[in-house]
Image: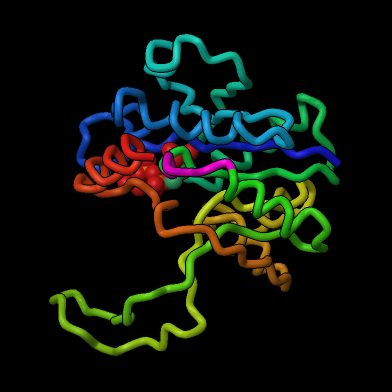
């Protein structure tokens, strides 16, 4: 089997408050998406990376003018739909059921090639597949609409799910099709089939740039790496 990467980059970045899709915001001299793609391109085992854009994206060519890799304008209204569109495109380009697909958020631009290698090393012989994740260090609280604590949640078995998430094309396509737009990641859809993806520890630095204040932290980490 081969290893493909699929990067959903069809979101609007509403929570970022950036006034444009956050994947195009300049961070440390390059659009966020360029950092993300550079990390994946530095993993020799990844045969191709497919970027999934919104059909009405009008920024990609100007933002990444030298991009040589695979691009498909098949994004949908949810992340899961964008990923499903990308999986169909991978099939059109020759990928088959047994090939591995590493789905990675465009917004996780701090990705490091060694974490991707660790994921592949841990999962390439696994019957299910797995994901990068980080054990929760903070005490976890549940809160209500007024911002008051309703409960303290036991953190000891809790992990923050990250990406890449790595599954066989046939399995992840079946799982996402069954769960639909409700799936916020691939692993949850695979879990709903009764399977247990492997958790592979990465780093807190593999966070998803989401809120306005995240851009400065990402820039700092990228400038000092
Ligand atoms: N994504 C996508 N298609 C969508 C929604 C999200 O391809 N319909 C992608 C985003 O571009 C992002 C990744 O999925 O790289 C993770 O999603 P998220 O961080 O939620 O990004 P946005 O949906 O763009 O941000 P927000 O939820 O704040 O609007
Ligand atoms: Mg979103």
Asked whether residue 7 is in view, the answer is: yes
Q: Is residue 186 above or below residue 42?
A: below
> How is the structure coloured here?
rainbow
Toward which corner of the image does residue 99 lie, by quadrant?
A: top right
> Which residue is pictured at 27% across the width and 41% down the height?
220
Q: Nearer the viewer, residue 81 or 184?
A: 184
In the depicted view, which residue is nearer to us: 180 or 221? 221
Identify which residue is drawn at 34% across, 27% down. Answer: 24
Please state, as top left, top right, bottom left or bottom right, where the N terminus lies in the image. Answer: top right
**Visible residue check, residue 77:** no
- Is-magenta flag for residue 110? yes
At 20% from the left edge and 47% from the top edge, which residue is drawn?
213
Which percent across, then down, holds residue 101? 70, 43
Residue 94 falls left or right of residue 23: right
Percent across and percent down for residue 150 are: 24, 88
Residue at the (21%, 85%) spot, across then down: 149
Q: Main secondary structure of the magenta part?
A: loop
Query: How far from the left and from the top, in percent, is residue 152?
Result: 31, 89
Q: Is residue 181 above or below residue 138?
A: above
Work out whether 79 lies above or below 37. below
Q: Is residue 99 left or right of residue 83?
A: right
Is the residue 43 above or below the residue 195 in the image? above
Residue at far left of view: 146
Check residue 86 for magenta coloring: no
Q: Report the span colored magenta.
A: 108-113
């Amino acid at each position: 089997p081969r290893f493909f990467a699929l990067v959903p980059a069809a979101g609007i970045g509403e929570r970022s408050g950036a006034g444009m899709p956050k994947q195009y915001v300049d961070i440390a001299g390059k659009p966020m998406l360029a950092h993300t793609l550079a990390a994946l391109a530095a993993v020799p085992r990844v045969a191709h990376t497919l970027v999934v854009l919104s059909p009405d994206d009008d920024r990609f060519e100007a933002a990444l003018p030298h991009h040589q890799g695979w691009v498909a304008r098949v994004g949908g209204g949810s992340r899961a739909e964008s990923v499903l569109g990308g999986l169909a495109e991978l099939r059109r380009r020759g990928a088959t059921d047994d090939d591995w697909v590493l789905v990675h958020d465009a917004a996780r631009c701090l990705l490091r090639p060694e974490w991707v290698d660790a994921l592949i090393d841990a999962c390439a012989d696994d019957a299910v597949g797995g994901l990068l994740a980080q054990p929760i260090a903070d005490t976890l609280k549940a809160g209500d609409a007024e911002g008051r604590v309703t409960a303290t949640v036991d953190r000891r078995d809790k992990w923050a799910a990250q990406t890449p998430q790595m599954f066989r094309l046939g399995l992840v396509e079946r799982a996402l099709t069954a769960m639909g737009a409700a799936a916020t990641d691939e692993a949850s859809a695979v879990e709903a089939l009764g399977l247990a993806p492997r958790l592979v520890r990465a780093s807190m630095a593999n966070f998803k740039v989401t809120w306005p204040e995240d851009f400065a932290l990402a820039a700092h980490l990228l400038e000092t790496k």
